[in-house]
Amino acid sequence: MKLQKIDQDQGARNRTRVIAELLRRPGLSRTDIGNAVGLNVASVSRITRDLINAGLVRETDPFGPRGRPGRRFVGLASRGEGGAVIGIGINAFRQSVTLADLENRKVAEWISQETPDENGEEFIGICLNKARDMVREHIPERNRFFGVGIAVAAELNKERGEILSAPVFGWTKPIAAADMVRELLDAPLVLDTPSSAINKAEADHGLGQGVANLITLHCSLRFGIGVRHMGDNGNTVQEFGRVLTQSKAPDGSKRNLSEACGGLSILKAIRGAESLVGHSDAALSAMLLEDIERAQNDSQTLALFRENGQRTAQYLSLVLDLCQPDRILLAGPLAKSGDYVSGFEQALPQCVSNSNHVPDIHCSDMTPTGASRWLALHGNVAKGNLDLDALRQETAA
């Protein structure tokens, strides 16, 4: 009995690796998948046959030699209509819920027209009720809804699925988000910060593919960081993310990262601190976007963005030395300012101790909501406890 359990666990791990690789690089042949995940072709064929029979994977058009010797290969990819996930992104700029298929194609969307108030549990409930309506309308086979991903600008307990606090909205009481998802949607939850979710999504599907050590800095009114570090053996990956709002200045001053070089600092310099009193973070976020746009015609404002980008690199010098990233991704509103980005690039070489290991810099267009869908696909589909027998029966019927 124990050997059977070990075989089942190993089979589940192998299936996870195959699905994750298909999500990462759709269109691969069975041989390509086996080479990527370290399985023989027979094992990959057995796993993908089960996934095809369950309606989760499809064969793509043949590729390879045509009109000359050599067998053409059949690719494999997720079957979009084989299931769906919910992605929820919540930050100061935007709060939205989207339903996506297994190819991360958006099926339905709801965007909040009101800024969340201090009752965080109520707002999470609103989002989940919108999600439930989408599932009921668009997913006739309930077994094919696989779960929820939430990327929220907050302090989190990811293992327990709890939002501990979200100063950006004034949320001070813990929110049992995973329990709420189970109650309202009878589904699992993957919870993360926007910066960490974007970092993971870009590492698997975008600008971070093939990069061993990757950092994403979410540059908004405040800051968040996501880190992905590949172990020396190439087989272990460590990932973490958190809000950096309270990170202190390297010169020992009492100012934190957001006060010194974030969006709040820029708004105070442009508009004056008094003019910002009483405005919600959502209103301040809208002001920041306006100022980024208007700055193109104002050399003094452009210089301000550039200086703040330089200070951001300086504040992160210790983090960069510890993590030694190969690539840094800048995401969020400030990443849309060319001068902020150029200031960061200009200061970066002086902020790393190893002049031979200066990371390259890219700007990410990935949104927290888009990243939350990838969270759901990886956490609830690739790593999910899927009942293939039930799905196979549905497909056969």
Image (tube, grey):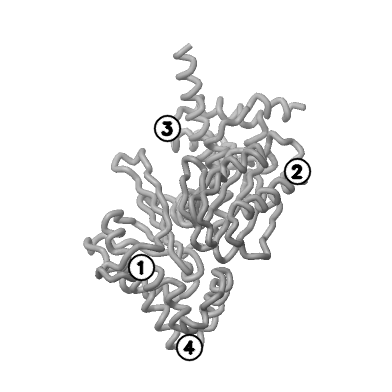
SS at circle 4: loop
Closer to viewer: mark 4 or mark 3: 4
Closer to viewer: mark 1 or mark 3: 1
Front residue of this view, candidates 136 and 235: 136
Query: Quick one: label 2 or label 4, which is nearer the N terminus?
Result: 2
The answer to whether 299 is drawn above or below residue 39 in the figure is below
The three-letter amino acid code for the residue at tag 3 is: Gly
Residue bearing mark 3: 38
Q: Are marks 2 and 4 in contact (CB under 8 Å)?
A: no
Q: Are marks 1 and 3 in contact (CB under 8 Å)?
A: no
Q: Is residue 40 left or right of residue 119?
A: left
Percent across and percent down for residue 319 are 30, 58
Q: Is residue 41 left or right of residue 255?
A: right
Closer to viewer: mark 3 or mark 2: 2
Residue bearing mark 1: 256
Q: Quadrant of the C terminus?
A: top right
Quadrant of the rendered structure where residue 82 is?
top right
Residue bearing mark 2: 136
Q: CA distance from mark 1 to mark 3?
A: 46 Å
Q: CA distance from mark 1 to mark 4?
A: 27 Å
Q: Residues within 10 Å of mark 2 (few under 14, many from 20)?
A: few
Quadrant of the rendered structure where residue 2 is?
top left
Q: Residues within 10 Å of mark 1 (few under 14, many from 20)?
A: some
Percent across and percent down for residue 93 are 57, 66
Closer to viewer: mark 1 or mark 4: 1
Q: Residues within 10 Å of mark 3 (few under 14, many from 20)?
A: few
Q: CA distance from mark 3 to mark 2?
A: 39 Å
Front residue of this view, candidates 35 and 329: 329
